[in-house]
Amino acid sequence: MSEQTIRMYGAPWCPDCRRAKQFFNEHRVSFQWVDIEKDPQAMAYVQEINKGKQIIPTIVFPDGSLLVEPSNAELAEKLGIRREASRKVYDVVIVGGGPAGLTAAIYTAREGLQTLVIERSGLGGQAGTTREIENYPGFPEPVGGAELAQRLTNQARRFSVEILQAQRVARVSSDGMHRTVHVESGQEYCAPALILATGATYRRLNVPGEADFIGAGIHFCATCDGPFYKGREVVVVGGGNSGFQEGLFLAGLVSKVTILEGAKEVHASKALQEKVAEHKSMEVFTQATVQEFKGRGKLEAIVVKDLPTGRTREMHPAAVFVFIGMQPNTEFLKGALELNPMGFVVTKPNLETSVEGVFAAGDCRLGSTKQLASAVGEGATAALMVREYLERVGEARTSQLS
């Protein structure tokens, strides 16, 4: 074990341990997990450094310092993550530090607008957690998601964009010419224009092992990751239109696609069902659910349960693609502006929402394609629309004063 490794001592049942692990994972901080229930020496060590008490999580940092049952704020402070901006008023505030948000920030900052980005987790969004990206324009060779996220972040900072991390937005409000972002820590940041680029989260199965193999055998984008598994067998989870569409795409690359659906019947359209039925390398199982993911370092097996009989079996696909829907990260926007029944932000053709001066871009927006290149394009477009809006309201305010 490297001396530069953060070590977290805990147990699987501990909620504070799960929270700390999630914090590290969201901010892409490497650490070693030590289960004290499986390691008597580790348990003794935790008791020793806590003066006889068995307190978890106990986190040991490379410099020898400790944090015991730390809050997210304490973890952020220890890692040097900035959680408070230098100002209270900006020209534009951007909620979300994924590709759409960072691109918007680069464009607004280049226009000379004082820009603040607020991100609750790791910069780069879902792209930042993707192992390799093959279809991003300008990169003839695959680029690592983390590398691309870092490039976007560095570019934004080069244009003096302020970035806050580990900050969740509680709500947004609008009062005349002012848009205010209220963060959970109590701070408020105001601007005449606001861009929402909060992204969306792929729904997960929430079964044992899933979190361990995301990006290492478990994927949520066939276009992005399917080419890595050419000529091999894969499993698709989800019998809706997305599962069947992505399964058909994968069938053009891999040797076999097995679709698993937990319900008695699939929900894909009749046309899609017919196409899958005609495909010799595709097979569909209903009332079948994934119970567990297994492997060492990468996915090696999945445990599948047949619901009518209760029997389980192991499958050994090269990868599993999960398509059970997306959840937009818009909970804090309920009641503040128009959302569709699924929670996606409704926008006009110019990406403005139902609230004047508030724009949306990327995966959180209704009608977005959920693709990296599109998110970047929408971020740039939203920034240009903000510039036009600020010019327009500036002229209106000038005419009112004259």
Image: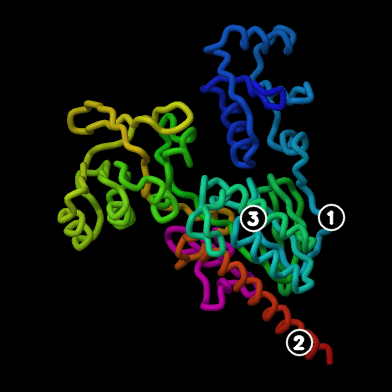
Q: Which residue corresponds to the image point at 45% horizontal and 32% vertical from the top-left?
A: 298
Amino acid tagged 1: Ser
Foreground pick, 105 / 393: 105
Magenta run includes residue 216: no
| Crowd rating for badge 3 (residues with CA inside 10 Å; few <14, some 14–19, many 20+) | many
Of marks 2 and 1, the one in the foreground: 1
Q: Give the x, y percent position of residue 400.
A: 79, 89
- State the CA–CA distance, disc 2 to disc 3: 30 Å
Q: In which quarter of the image is the C terminus?
A: bottom right
Choose the circle earlier in sequence order: 2 or 3. Answer: 3
Q: Is residue 209 above or below residue 138?
A: above
- The residue at which mark 1 appears reads as 86
Q: How is the image coloured?
A: rainbow
Choose the circle earlier in sequence order: 2 or 1. Answer: 1
Task: Please provide the residue range marked out in magenta.
Answer: 334-363
Of marks 3 and 1, the one in the foreground: 3
Q: In which quarter of the image is the N terminus?
A: top right
Q: What element carries label 3?
A: loop
Q: Does residue 239 appear left or right of residue 87 in this picture?
A: left
Of marks 2 and 3, the one in the foreground: 3
Q: Give the x, y percent position of residue 359.
A: 60, 70
| Crowd rating for badge 1 (residues with CA inside 10 Å; few <14, some 14–19, many 20+) | few
- State the CA–CA distance, disc 2 to disc 1: 28 Å
Main secondary structure along the magenta-highlighted residues = loop
- The residue at which mark 2 appears reads as 395
Please tell me the numbered disc located at residue 97.
3
- State the CA–CA distance, disc 3 to disc 1: 18 Å
Q: Which residue corresponds to the image point at 22% horizontal and 39% vertical from the top-left?
A: 287
Amino acid tagged 3: Gly
